[in-house]
Image: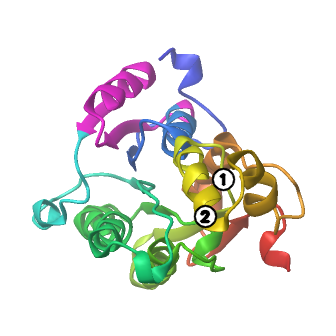
Amino acid sequence: MAEENRQGPEGLAGRRALVTGGASGIGLASATALARAGADVTIADVDEQAAGQAARALGGKAWAVDLSDTKSLEELSLDIDILVNNAGVQRVAPIHEFDPEAWRLIHRLMLESPFLLIRAALPGMRERGFGRIINISSIHGLRASAFKSAYVAAKHGLEGLSKATALEGADFGITSNSINPGYVRTPLVQKQIADQAKVHGIEESEVVQKIMLTEAAIKRMVEPEEVASLVAWLCADAAGMVTGASYAMDGGWSAR
């Protein structure tokens, strides 16, 4: 990446960032924003080819990893300044039909692995007196929806983990915050349209307006770059007093 693109108002030159699920969607947009602000970015993703391609485009590194294999993360040590916990999956089904293994997968990937990555990163952050932990939560970390019990429960758990981390990191220059977007225009959201249509008994073409945007005051999806702009700001020195917060970016959904 050209030098003029590696400096920005956020002043992250020399900072080392890890972004999970960084090969697409919110993760890729966040990795791009951090790299443009000067950070050295590592893309962690289960898709090795996509992670490598994204890393090369940003002048960063790739880490091909299945974060749902949480046992393998227990002895991990991370020498990073910024951690963006973004990796996730979605399953849509009524509770009485929800596959227990799908429930466990979602919780391993979206709650247990963020805990283990934070655990791995905190010692180095404490030693250096600086750390930024950004947890990509969801409006579903603040509000529930039917047929998403595993996702809602995991995101609510991530909110608690983020706040506990904020309290433990406060004396060491470490902040921890959550971002809570509504439906974001990503492959993850696109993949759930068919499932949403099935459980709600409507056509796929009706899902976005009748289900996804019904609670939002602003009737459009969030763009990944909008989330990424907040990620970059939260990593900056100017956000040093912002910790333990949950930032709704939901078009007014949570205002109801």
Instruction: Tell whether 93 sits left or right of 53.
Output: right
| Residue 179: image tag | 2
193 or 90: nearer the viewer: 193
Instruction: Tell whether 176 sits left or right of 7.
Output: left
Label 1 – label 2 distance at C-alpha: 8 Å
Q: What element does badge 2 sit on?
A: strand
Q: Which mark is nearer the camera, 1 or 2?
A: 2
Q: Which residue is mark 1?
A: 230
Residue 59, horizontal then vertical, whole percent: 39, 23
Q: Residue 11 magenta-drawn? A: no
| Residue 54: image tag | none
Point 48% across, 37% down: residue: 24
- Outermost residue, top side: 2
Residue 215, horizontal then vertical, whole percent: 82, 69
Q: Is residue 241 visible?
A: yes
Q: Which residues are the magenta region?
A: 36-63
Say above or below: 113 vs 160. Answer: above
